[in-house]
Image (spheres, rainbow, N blue to C red):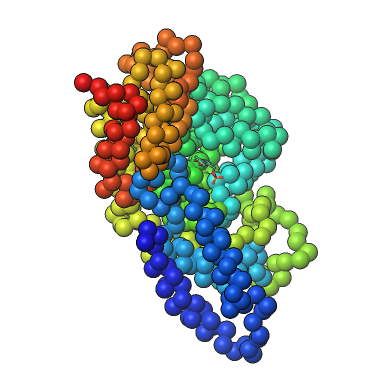
Amino acid sequence: MHLEETSLQLLKDSLKQLDAGFKKLPPASENASSPQDSRLAVVMNEVATKLQDNYPYFHPLYAGQMLKPPHPIARAAYALATWINPNNHALDGGRASSALEKEAVARIAAMFGWQEHLGHLCGGGTMANLEALWVAGQLNPGKKIVASEQSHYTHKRISAVLQLPFAEVPTDNRGRMDPSALEKMLAAGDVGCVVATEGTTGTGSVDPLPEILRLRERYGFRLHVDAAYGGYFTLASNLAAETRASFELIGRADSIVIDPHKHGLQPYGCGCVLFRDPQVGAIYKHESPYTYFTSSDLHLGEISLECSRPGASAVALWATQRLLPLVRGGEFAAMLEASRDAAVRFAERLANDARWLLPFAAELDIVVWGPRAKTVAEISALSQLIFDAAAKQNLHLALIRVPIKFFGAQHNLQASAADTVLCLRSVLMKPEHRDWLDRIWTILSRVADSAVGPVS
Ligand SMILES: Cc1ncc(COP(=O)(O)O)c(C=O)c1O
């Protein structure tokens, strides 16, 4: 059996404990769709068969996009909560799960050094960034949002939704925001918020916070950190010094986004937005004629844009953090370190092999590389070929279109008329990737040799 089953027993045992909490209620008859109904088994079998049409995200040979299943404890805790189906909009709908959300979010804030904060969970990185940029826009109405040209496309779209002007800041050859280009934009005096991405989606590049913070002192702007992907690497001990220097400063931001459904071992959708100043809660102020009556304590709906939200997400996150605390040197940190280590070793192999072109060393656990060829068009065509051929050998990679400037002068690609080149990309976000590196390499080599022919 490839798929883990331990969570099923965990779920069964914990369900009994949950049930015991309601023993004072009179028995109620089972509803019409009881699991004894044989049609349920038929439909579930059909569902399982349909779900087979997926890439194997759980397997180490899936080394493509940012996808992996949740930790078994998250899976069991989430499923357990669905027996109650709490709604974390208000304490009316999710009393216990709201308390767990507040605790879990406070632990994430503490990871960035914040003892005081305002924050909550939400549907994912897009929703979390929307809230952060909405608050930025409320505080600096009409002013520009800027983010690097390698930032997630969501920032441009969100700015359009919020009807705020948006501009892209050029990056250096390693996909990081170029501080001198940022400074030129700031000099115009119309920037209200700078989005720094600590771990870009494409290449895992980390915008330089030391320089960006120096510019904040000079020009004054709201700093939002999009650490949807990279945030948890704050706990990793094996980052390069330059990357570490930026991660140490994330807590200086005005707002932070981090996605527990990426590196936090959670099911989708679990994003998190944090604000350094709890006073921004006033911006969320609204009246609800239907809720907020059961308690004078803070209802999470009072400080979030979404209304109904799964309390199960908070339950799963709390359980995961209880088992695997967010501390340096801990078991959870070791998982991130293993992923990072896998990326470093993989990149080293690529750099030392004549068949491949490596634009730059991985900053986190994402590696981008291309097959060596004479022209940009050939590199793009070969990347596609290798991507398809590897999938047939059960090795699932990803593709990415990157600016050719990432390859710098060393590879002599700048002569091309095209500005971008299609490359291969691997997000090595499962700790098991480290142990599977030899097998991944063997398949990749076989595929490349049959696509390109062995390089002597
Ligand atoms: C840096 C970054 N920001 C934002 C997002 C959007 O997050 P979501 O897909 O959870 O909406 C992503 C997703 O990959 C991301 O990597």
Quadrant in which the N terminus appears: bottom left
Q: Residue furthest left?
A: 456
Occupied quadrant, residue 364: top left
Looking at the image, which is closer to me, 24 or 78? 78
Occupied quadrant, residue 118: bottom right
Residue 189 in sight in this render: yes
- Where residue 175 appears, as percent x and y from the top left, is 43, 28
- Where residue 117 appears, as percent x and y from the top left, is 52, 54
- Where residue 220 appears, as percent x and y from the top left, is 55, 32
Above or below, 349 against 439 in this view is above
Above or below, 250 against 418 in this view is below
Tell me which residue sits at (52%, 58%) in the image.
Answer: 49
Tell me which residue sits at (54%, 51%) in the image.
Answer: 271
Q: Residue furthest right?
A: 289
Q: Residue furthest top?
A: 415
Question: How many numbered callouts?
Answer: 0
- Where residue 157 appears, as percent x and y from the top left, is 64, 35
Residue 180 in sight in this render: no
Quadrant in which the C terminus appears: top left
Q: Is residue 21 left or right of residue 248?
A: right
Above or below, 389 against 92 in this view is above
Tell me which residue sits at (71%, 70%) in the image.
Answer: 293
Looking at the image, which is closer to me, 72 or 259? 72
Looking at the image, which is closer to me, 80 or 190? 80
Occupied quadrant, residue 147: top right
Tell me which residue sits at (69%, 38%) in the image.
Answer: 162
